[in-house]
Amino acid sequence: MEGKKYYITTPIYYPSGNWHIGHCYTTVICDALARFHKMSGEEVFFLTGTDEHGQKVEKEALKRGITPHAFIDPLVARLKDMWRLLDVGYDRFIRTTDEDHVRCVQKIYQKLYESGDVYKSEYEGYYCTPCESFWTESQLVGGKCPDCGREVTLQREESYFFRLSKYAPALLEHYKKDPEFLQPKSRVNEMVNNFLKAGLNDFSVSRTTVKWGVPLPFDEKHTAYVWIDALLNYITALGYGSEDDSLFRKFWPADLHMVGKEIVRFHSIIWPAMLMALGIPLPKQIYGHGWLLIGGEKLSKSKENARPELTDPYELVKRYGTDAVRYYLLREIPFGSDGEYTTERFLLRVNADLANDLGNLVSRTSAMIVQYFGGVLPARGEAEGPDGELASLAEGAFSKVKRAMDGLNAPEALEAIFGVVARANKYIDETTPWLLAKDPAKRERLGAVLYNLAEVCRIAAILLKPFLTKAPALILRSFSCDENEGFESLAFGGLKEGAKVVKLPPIFPRLDLKKELAETERLAKETSNEAKPASAEDEKAPIGIEDFGKVELKIGEVIACERVAKSEKLLHETVKIGSETRSVVSGIAKFYTPEEMVGKKVVLVTNLKPVKLCGVLSEGMILCAEDGEGNLSLLSPERAVESGAKVR
């Protein structure tokens, strides 16, 4: 009999390069779910990737004078680096520029065109470039995009449309028949009442004004609308419509599409309608989770509330480790709802659960076995006092974890595991092994107590493996267990008497809250080479020509460039300015690689006071332009100009 299959997807991401901890939320949750199902004996396919077509990419590449591929490739590599950093173990990373995806998208459009579900007409609507979304006037909020609050533009163009209105009755019927199709329930009310019952309009699925996209096979003046291109990745990644569709036949329909609440409309209305038109079964469930907030607002680089020293996953992992970041995301955020991020909450959660509870339990247990039994695991002995309660709680934890994970509730699953850890710490206080060690007559009892504690450490480590990727293996090795032990080994008593136990130092050292917050602020000042933004009043106040004349601007040529070792965002350039060369540090590593920088002509402020950034001398500032998304573009002379030329 064929085993169970589990197919889980994240939305595919636009690889902006401006990553913050909020971007990691969906993917880390999906990784934990994929790991849990794999450990449960299921065959799992976990998909993530990048959404690389559309107007945003086209504009940014044009700004830089490079091809869209040249612009997007380093950003995709950067995103993959972030997933490696967080130990995200996807089964495929799809790019919408992948050849197999492009071919399949064209086949699907052709099929829908031939069936009459796609037809040519003309479209007029309000377009938000950052969201790649069209809106009707009634959907705008204060005349702006209802999703991101940015400006929209009225656009009119020839377009191919998908007959979305045709599938409204079938969609409503599906929602009635399958109440679990969209979760949580609040998303159902929004989709049904605001969209389905209000009536669906046919949906524009092509563009003539955007060339960076998949050309339609029946009309090459048009490219596929980026959102349709992106949604189709869920089936193209499995080989749908290709010569080898074995993965599609094995794993479709998807068990879970995990998405942020801002894109539920695309996934729960447009996507299932397209699948209906193609005669493909609908996914089993779509889950629209909440946002990670800071200061009551969604984390956003464009709103400047995602300060890199506070929310950059690279910085957080470097300072606190992969497990700490994963644990915070999986434990702290109430699933389905918005969660508030603060550095204090992050540090408090790491201290309370990982350092005080788990780390302390493992460290004390292994240390006492080494101290009292020479590092040899004693016998379990007969149960007495609280022994039975502890064993029962440890053995029963898996059913609670499974129930929580089946309900997509990682915080509840972790709460169950740490409930066992907390009970074990209380057990230490109840049994007082340090007092038992003083009485030779109680040595057998001491051995039983320490065995029970070691067994809780083993079981907790196994249960934590879907969530944490470093600590469980360390714990299991310290008690001479196979680090590949799975859920089949959760019966209490699995540890063998006589096993070697190695004292494990604190795997999560306790953090000094005040010191960490102070260090965070210090790093912010050290790594920032940008001037403090002017206030609204300063921006309005005119300056005299004598003020402007104080700034010395020259053309420089980058002759060498490398990354700054202590920073994820800084590049160290050697810049030729006429007959001299200077060392310059710039915060542009998320937008340009060292290789791209060499040979570029740049505009440089040359009379700034030299400073050291991350220990590297900076003798000037390279000027960039910044768009509303926080993306940077170097300022360069329009024509060939010698280095050292003055900018007037």
Image: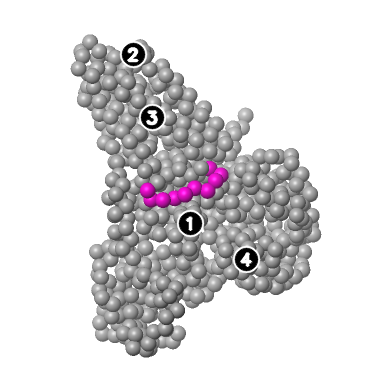
Q: Identify the mark nearer the N-term, 4 or 3.
A: 4
Instruction: State the CA–CA distance, disc 4 to disc 1.
Output: 21 Å
Q: Could you tell me residue 207's position as x and y percent?
A: 67, 69
Question: In the image, what residue occupies the spot 36% across and 75% down?
Answer: 622
Q: Identify the mark nearer the N-term, 2 or 1.
A: 1
Quarter location, residue 424: top left
Quadrant holding the N terminus: top right
Q: Nearer the viewer, mark 4 or mark 3?
A: 4
| Marks 4 & 1, CB-CB < 8 Å contact | no
Quarter location, residue 499: top left
Q: Could you tell me residue 160's position as x and y percent?
A: 73, 66
The amino acid type found where label 3 is placed reads Ala
Report the residue marked by disc 3: 422
The amino acid type found where label 4 is placed reads Gly
Report the residue marked by disc 1: 299
Front residue (pair 98, 467): 467
Quarter location, residue 471: top left
Badge 3: how crowded within 10 Å, few (<14), some, or many (20+)?
some
Instruction: State the CA–CA distance, disc 2 to disc 1.
Output: 53 Å
Question: In the image, what residue occupies the spot 42% across and 32% down?
Answer: 418
In the image, is 611 to the left or to the right of 487?
Answer: left
Q: Identify the mark nearer the N-term, 4 or 2.
A: 4
